Image (cartoon, helix red, strand yellow):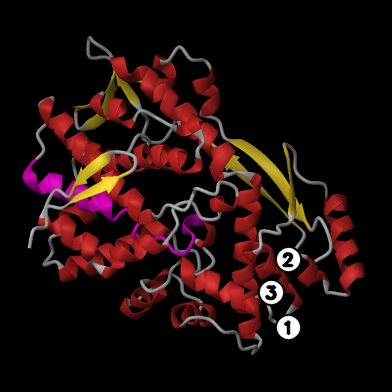
Amino acid sequence: MNKLKILNDPIYGFITIPNSLIFDLIQHKYFQRLRRITQMGMSYLVYPGAHHTRFHHAIGCVHLMQQAVNVLRFKGVDISKAEEEALYVAILLHDIGHGPFSHAMEHSIVNNVSHEQISLLFMERLNLEFNSNLTLAIKMFKGEYHRNFMWELISGQLDMDRADYLKRDSFYTGVAEGNINSERLITMLNVVDDELVVEEKGIYSVEKFIVARRLMYWQVYLHKTGLVAEQLLIRVLKRAKELINSGVKLTASDPLQYFLNHEISIKDFNDDALEIFSKLDDYDIVSAMKAWQDHDDFVLSNLCDMVINRSLLKIKMKNKPIKINQLEKHIENLIKTYGITRMEAEYFVFTGKTSNQAYQLEHQNINILHKPGKIQDIVKASDQLNLKALSKPVIKYYICYPKEAL
């Protein structure tokens, strides 16, 4: 069977699958599940085109990694065949542990287990199936391989993950501000002392990349409507678990039922739990919410109705923390109008905060390589004053409450 297939991608055109191992991993049911996990969670409620999946994104990352390997080899960086394959495997599987609606439900389905931890569990399981052919990729993914630039390509501040998702999410949302020139960025990459650097000529592409990241976060990823929709989704799961714990029967698919009935933390993530998790996707959550819309429980039915029919809570963003009396006023109003308990009212009235840091000065810096061989952090190398400002976290506070009758 010919495994060197060509895929047609709306962003990059034709993408070639580099070898039979990558083909077999793409064909595996664990990876095929990513076709049913949206890349951008609830953002489609704001940007109707944002229905692309984690599957799209992972394939795009492999394509960019192929370009990066070719560029670095052309510049004399020694990358063995085994290292090349491991880079492709690690970037292909870097998001395989995402649950339904990507980040929206990361800590709702399971207890404080990140998608990176679940990705690692999937990789280790696949490694058993694939005769230990993923061992080097796992080492790179964990940052334990001695050549640090390879980890930076997978999970640094200028990695192939970001290079793909900014361009892809910009395309599918129609938000032009995020459209980075990933091809030029990759062409300007080099390696010095096993650390990733960007040649001086690429400095403006890096500036654009950091600014694009900031704009995409405020305009898309942290858009207030997407934010409130994600909060409602988290509360749907929380309420469903509460009801089940008190003996109420809820209809849901078997995989979802399992995670509603059990509190699964990282130590409980055995092979059985992983197998059940691999059958869970966006469709389980949507079909459950469609059923729960008509449930007798006031909180669950209203939360589901809000998400399914996009009749969301009102959200106000502020630069300062929300005053307690503001919150209390809305809670009291809800209790009085519907005769519900304070705990039930708090499902519909709540505050929170969100932050955005486009560039982390202390974490895996983006370094610029000047002609004489001098290496400088992008913030120092750039004459763009606002890059220093973009390395500081910006925090915004929000309050959510019903805008009309429930």
Return the residue at label 2.
Answer: 347
The image quarter in which residue 171 lies: top left
Q: Percent position (x, y) of residue 25?
A: 21, 61
Q: Percent position (x, y) of residue 109?
A: 50, 69
Q: Which residue corresponds to the image point at 65% horizontal and 74% vertical from the top-left?
A: 239
Cα–Cα span, label 2 and label 1:
16 Å
152 displayed left or right of 356: left
Residue 173 visible within the image: yes
Return the residue at label 3.
Answer: 300
246 or 57, which lies in front? 57
Sequence-earlier tag: 3 or 2: 3
Neighbourhood count class around disc 1 (C-alpha, 10 Å): few under 14, some 14–19, many 20 upward: few
76 displayed left or right of 388: left
Do tag 3 and tag 2 residues touch (Cβ < 8 Å)?
Answer: no
143 or 314, which lies in front? 314
Sequence-earlier tag: 2 or 1: 1
Q: Give the residues in magenta.
A: 80-103
Is 211 one of the magenta-colored residues? no
Q: Amino acid at mark 3?
A: Leu
The image quarter in which residue 31 lies: bottom left
Q: Percent position (x, y) of residue 324?
A: 83, 51
Q: Amino acid at mark 2?
A: Tyr
Q: Percent position (x, y) of residue 220?
A: 55, 42
Q: Secondary structure at mark 3?
A: helix
In the image, is residue 225 above or below residue 269?
above
**Can you tell which mark lies on residue 296?**
1
